[in-house]
Amino acid sequence: MDESKSRSVTGLQIAFLIVALLFIAAPAEKYLFNEWTWARDNGIPVTRFAIFAVAAIVLFGLPSPRRLCVNLLSTSLAKGTTHEIPVGLALNIVAGFAALGAPVLLIWLLGGEPALARRVGDEMKDAEQMSRALALGGILTFLVIGGVIAPILEELTFRGILYPAWARQWGWLRSALATSFVFALVHPNHFAQFFASLIYIGIFRRTGALRAPIIVHGLYNMSMWYPLIGQFIFPASAQGNGEISHFSFNLFCLAFVAIAVPAYLWMSRDKRAIAAVSAQELSR
């Protein structure tokens, strides 16, 4: 057997490592970080900081991963592709509105307007949402973790390393779907994150640089902060009301995203991510 192949890191191994890290985080939050009452009372996401700290140590603390990350981060966008950043951001924001339309449509189809009215009644009030967003925990979650830390570390892990590893095994399209499935699995809003991952992969392929999805990822996360676009995702007219018509814009976004995101990804089929990394280098 070829030694390089026997020592190479596969996409399944990388995905297993990602999921294992999250499983480890669950008991850590319950038995370790739960004692940090000052952090819990202020809504500070200690567990998320810990997860990203471990990821940063793995990616930048070891020689081989560090070389890969530096290579990925140092690659500039291909000439004439900077327009992909606002296009990808706009498409991602539309997907954010569509993410509410999907469960609303499902609830309405299964239980009608009474079921939808009960679900709407469980939504947090505007004042409470705004208060949480402006608290220290909300600012750290959306502007520090969401705007800076998560985009860099998650794009390096998922689009920079996992996606190319699977692409060599299964081809670019199946790899895009598999990578997006894992990305959605480790996030709470599965629908939104699945389509977001497809968008990030399309941007990566079309620009040839991981910088582009990192920028779009960060800007999107910050824009979803409640004082900004986040407060408009749930229509104000739907408060305490189960009429499906109140969610017309969300449903329109859902239909648009169902067509636009696959089309955007498909348009990148003849592109290659210049900074795509060989998973074999991880084992050197």
Image: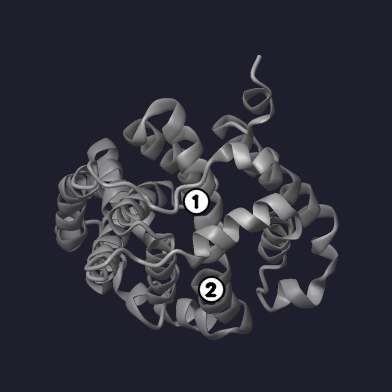
Q: CA distance from mark 2 to mark 1?
A: 16 Å
Q: Would you say the residues marked 2 and 1 are in contact, meaning their CB atoms lie under 8 Å apart?
A: no
Q: Please provide percent x and percent y for residue 35.
A: 85, 65
Which numbered disc covers residue 57? none
Q: Is residue 255 above or below residue 40?
A: above
Q: Quadrant of the N terminus?
A: top right
Residue in the image at 49% along x and 74% along y? 147
Which label sits on residue 148? 2
What element does badge 2 sit on?
helix
- Secondary element at image label 1: helix
For residue 155, side relative to residue 135 (left or right): left
Could you tell whether 121 is left or right of 165 in the image? left
- Measured as percent of width and height from the top left, residue 103 is found at 32, 47
Q: Is residue 185 visible?
A: no
Q: Quadrant of the C terminus?
A: top right
Residue 88 screen position, x and y as percent = 27, 63
Compared across the picture, whether 140 is left or right of 201 comes to: right
Residue at position x 49%, y 78% from top? Answer: 128
Residue located 35% across and 56% down the image: 208
* First in sequence: mark 2 vs mark 1: 2
- Which residue position is annotated with label 1? 160
- Kind of residue at badge 2: Val
How many numbered circles does the render carry? 2
Residue in the foreground of this view, choosing between 113 and 223? 223
Looking at the image, residue 68 lies above or below residue 48: above
Mark 1 crowdedness (10 Å alpha carbons): few <14, some 14-19, many ≥20: many
Front residue of 247/175: it is 175
Say what amino acid the circle numbered 1 marks: Gly
